[in-house]
Image: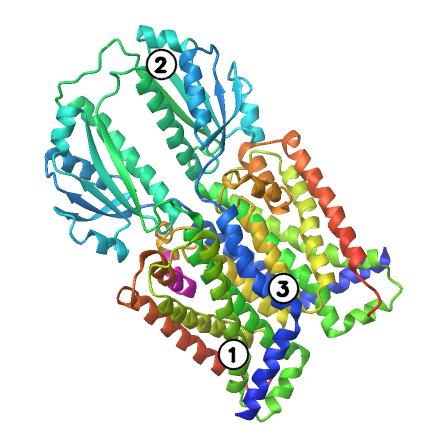
Amino acid sequence: MRTVFFLVRKEFLQIFRDRTTVFQIFMIPVVQLLVLANAATFDVKRVAMLVVDEDRTTVSSGLVQRFQAGKQFRVVRYEATDADVDHALLDREVTAVLHIPRRFEEDLVRRGRAPVQLVLNAEEGATAGIVQGYANAILSGYAAELDRTLPTGRRPSPRVAPLDLRTQRWYNPTRNYKHWMVPALMVSLTTIIGLLLTAQNITRENELGTLEQLNVTPMTKVQFIAAKLIPFWILSMVIFSLGLAIGKLVFGIPMLGNLLLVYLAAGVYLIVVLGIGLAISTVTRTQQQAMFVAFFVMLIFLLMSGLFTPVDSMPDWAQRVAEANPVKHFVNIMRAVLMRGAGLETVGPPIVGLGVAGVVVLALAVLRYRKSVA
Amino acid sequence: MRAFLGFVRKETLHLLRDRQTLAILILFPVVQVLIFGFAVRTDVRDIAIAIVDPTPDVATLELRERVAASDRFTVAQVLPSAAPLEAAFRRGTVRQALVLPDEVERRLGRGDSLPLQLLTDGSDPNTAGIMMTYATAIVDRWYRDQAPGAGGLRIEPQARMRYNPTLESAHLFVPGLLAFVLTIVSALMTAISIAREKETGTMEMLLVSPIRPKAIVVGKVIPYIVLGFVSVVLVLVAARLVFAVPLRGSLVLLLLESGLYIVTALALGVVISTKAPNQRTAMLAALAGLMMPTLLLSGFIFPLDSLPKVLQWLSYVVPARWYLTIVRGIMLKGAGLDTLWQETVILVGMTVFLLAKGSRGLAIRLG
């Protein structure tokens, strides 16, 4: 036990001696969380739109006004013909083109329905879908409005049951995208720093030759791995707490569930991540190799975690693969506990799963670590 | 010149000798393309929905069938009452619920009002919005068929998705992936390889040799330029063969721009390495400092238009942003240099600036 304690002390001294590294370890996650939380959003605002209005009636200009009035669109050009539309899209001058055909008003009055065409720049797919949703909402809202004001010959018969569809959104009433992203970004930043530091650590001793010095001491393999794990676990927990504090104070993320549960999950999760880092460090020889393997593993973990894109949309096989992804489980736990107030009965099983994974990777790291140099 | 060639040869050997790193460098772009193309989708499908149907009849069965038939939804539960919903939402087994009133068929026949409730897990506001749109569309269509003659005016939008009509995710991600892989691989590799010579002490040997410091940097960078090009070609071939991603513009232009961008990224790596005393610092700066900005501030995953103004300005200094615009322009829109010259000029400017800064920062003496 004393051996482990001294080694842990040595690691801390080594880290804190190097001012640049200390600065990087703490500042990179904090700054990135502050900055990137604002960047990670699909919340499309003020989409540049070109309107081609061939109808030029009160009804059609009313529609254009509805688009202009909302926060989501800004009409940058208003044309009578569709010449030059392609060029505006190609140049990224506009993202959307609304084309109101001739006889728009007439069709509405006579037939009760009229088409409009919406052309979207789908270069960035997610945006196009969201913009389309906004546009549809405006169109149906305007149609409902016209239904009351526009004199048409067709009135629905009173015998028909009126549909009364009420919609409710739970758990994020203010629709704040940051409440959804900040907990996940915290996870990813803690993971990046923790994984890189541990992956690089043993190979560094190897490269500098100090690993041999450690190997000739009577310390056991388990003690060695423990001594490498503990300091980075503590550091990562501190980074995680910093992130949580920033999330609460700066972004006002909800904390419906029990914070102890979050910490329990974080503690177990970090053992898995740092264990993976150490395992990488034992199978590689140089720091360069270690970093590349770590980077490779990390990107796959992050991209398949549901952090940026919904896991439910992935094909079945990919969802099954994602079951083995610790990042996915921890992101889920964080969101469930903080946003939906889920308790132990919901997040217990994944935490146990993470615990098992932690034991496995640590065992792997201990087994792979060789005290003798081949 | 001979000394220089010998140095380039040494660097190439270093790179080729390390099989493990080389394998990852080659595998890395290909695996990325496959993951993005197959596994990561930005559209919303297979939403777990619960339907509360107190008195099943012909009309409600029809609605249930329509929901089940849509590939947007998977019916997770059909319940007689709304009581267990809250727990299911909290567990996350259900993300949306449609609560029907009793005796739907009778209500339709009598002309009573038809109160329906649509509950959505709104934790993720965007996905929630999309889920609501889908569910509402199904209910609306069902209602119009059940109660013909109902419903007032309709404006029918016909959407056309330009440049990527099927919203195929591989088409969207491949250009971003190119930028991402190149930034990380080139910048990280150079930064580490120079920092490593410093850390192991071999930099001093190089500096006392007759090779000039600038030649050292150029010599270090040359093998990685080749490697960067290999990555570009690999990504393009994988994207083409597996996902049939279009290349509407000129291939030559795309390769030239990629060559330019590789130099930009390498110059970035040189600048990082001149500041970093050891590999750990270089790695943290290159990876932690570049990875998230390249993912999030380039328009790769999140659209640039939705960034706050300050971050939009910040994104102007992220080289990946300009390269991404260029690649998307060439691949998806078939744009030529006449539309993309501004972006190209900006990239050239950045490269010149970074190179100048890097060669200035490289001291003749250490410490």
Report which residue position mark 2 lands on: B114
- Given residues B236 and A10, the one toward you in this image is B236
- Which chain is indicated by disc 3? A
Q: Check the image and tell me how it is coloured.
A: rainbow
Share a chain, discs 1 and 3? no
Q: Give the magenta-colored segment's residue range.
A: B312-324
* B160 left or right of A153 in image: right
In which quadrant is the N terminus of chain A drawn? bottom right
Residue at 49% x, 39% y is A313
Share a chain, discs 1 and 2? yes
Q: CA distance from mark 1 to mark 3?
A: 21 Å
Report which residue position mark 1 lands on: B222
Residue B230 place in picture, x, y as percent: 51, 68
Q: Amino acid at mark 1?
A: Ile
* B342 left or right of A169 in image: left
Residue A7 place in picture, x, y as percent: 79, 62
The stretch drawn in magenta includes residue B318: yes
In the picture, residue A29 is in which quadrant? bottom right
Report which residue position mark 3 lands on: A291
Q: Residue furthest front?
A: B241
Residue at 62% x, 65% y is B23
Q: Main secondary structure of the magenta part?
A: helix
Share a chain, discs 2 and 3? no
- Given residues A266 and B166, the one toward you in this image is B166
Residue at 81% x, 61% y is A6
The residue carrying pointer 2 sits among few (fewer than 14), some (14 to 19) or many (20 or more) residues within 10 Å by Cα, namely: many
